[in-house]
Image (cartoon, rainbow, N blue to C red):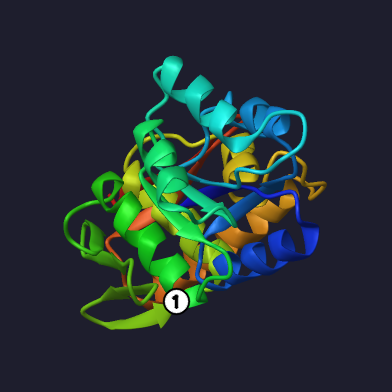
Amino acid sequence: MRILLAEDERSLSRAVAALLERNHYAVDAVYDGREALDYLAGGNYDALILDIMMPKMDGMEVLRCLRQEGNSIPVLMLTAKGEVEDKVRGLDSGANDYLTKPFATEELLARLRAMTRHSVQLSSQLTFGNLCLDQTTFELSTSTGSFRLANKEYQMMELFLRNPRQIIPTERFLERIWGYDSEVEVSVVWVYISYLRKKLSALQADVEIRASRNLGYALEVRT
């Protein structure tokens, strides 16, 4: 799951991004409202964590623009403005939830899970063939055994299992998992595909990752 974090306090932004990444989220961080809207225009995010007090365009303006455009992305307002009227204004403007600073990291993660629950399957598991990915424990398993996936591996396999049999371009992996501003080489996708293929083989999975030349990769049933 990919999160856009719009927070102009850079030390807090780095801390929140590190927390999210440790919990298997992919994160892009931006530091003003206009930049947040530019990133969101690509439509490549599952949720937005949005500060109110930001330069160029504040969080409330960003939120109003999103909702006026019909963008229904889940939004968690993360801000020092904790008065009841501020919360009401944020929620009435289209926010899904509101968390004031300072906050407990466990509460941030719990609110993010609750806010995005509608966008994931009711079950915590994604399945295809005899393969199962547990979105709570990050374990990839078959009846043969299981592996707890590292962050990037989990995000790639989650994308595959949400789009079985569909070719996913290499560029989509780079944008969604490493971010728009990443300078990683295209070859890094192949490296992680290789890691996942080895795990699928070890688990005796009846599905495999197939490459389509110059197009991308797809998770398919073995034939």
x 51%, y 29%: residue: 43
Q: Is residue 144 visible?
A: yes
Q: In the current view of this chain or complex, which residue is farthest to the right?
A: 183
Name the residue that disc number 1 marks.
106
Tell me where residue 39 appears, x and y as whole percent. Answer: 64, 31
Q: Is residue 215 visible?
A: no
Give the vertical position of 34 relative to 191 (above or below): above
Residue type at mark 1 is: Glu
Relative side of 20 to 179, left or right: left
Tell me where residue 136 appears, x and y as whole percent. Answer: 32, 72
Q: Local crowd at mark 1 within 10 Å, few (<14), some, or many (≥20)?
A: few
Relative side of 80 to 12, left or right: left
Tell me where residue 24 appears, x and y as whole percent. Answer: 51, 66
Seen from the viewer's position, the closer of residues 189 and 139 is: 139
Relative side of 25 to 27, left or right: left
Seen from the viewer's position, the closer of residues 51 and 221 is: 51
Q: Secondary structure at mark 1?
A: helix
Residue 14 lies in quadrant: bottom right
Tell me where residue 60 appears, x and y as whole percent. Answer: 55, 33
Q: In the current view of this chain or complex, which residue is farthest to the top?
A: 69
Give the vertical position of 219 relative to 10 (above or below): above
Give the vertical position of 3 relative to 15 (above or below): above
x 29%, y 45%: residue: 119
Residue 18 lies in quadrant: bottom right
Seen from the viewer's position, the closer of residues 90 and 150 is: 90
Relative side of 75 to 101, left or right: left
x 60%, y 61%: residue: 192
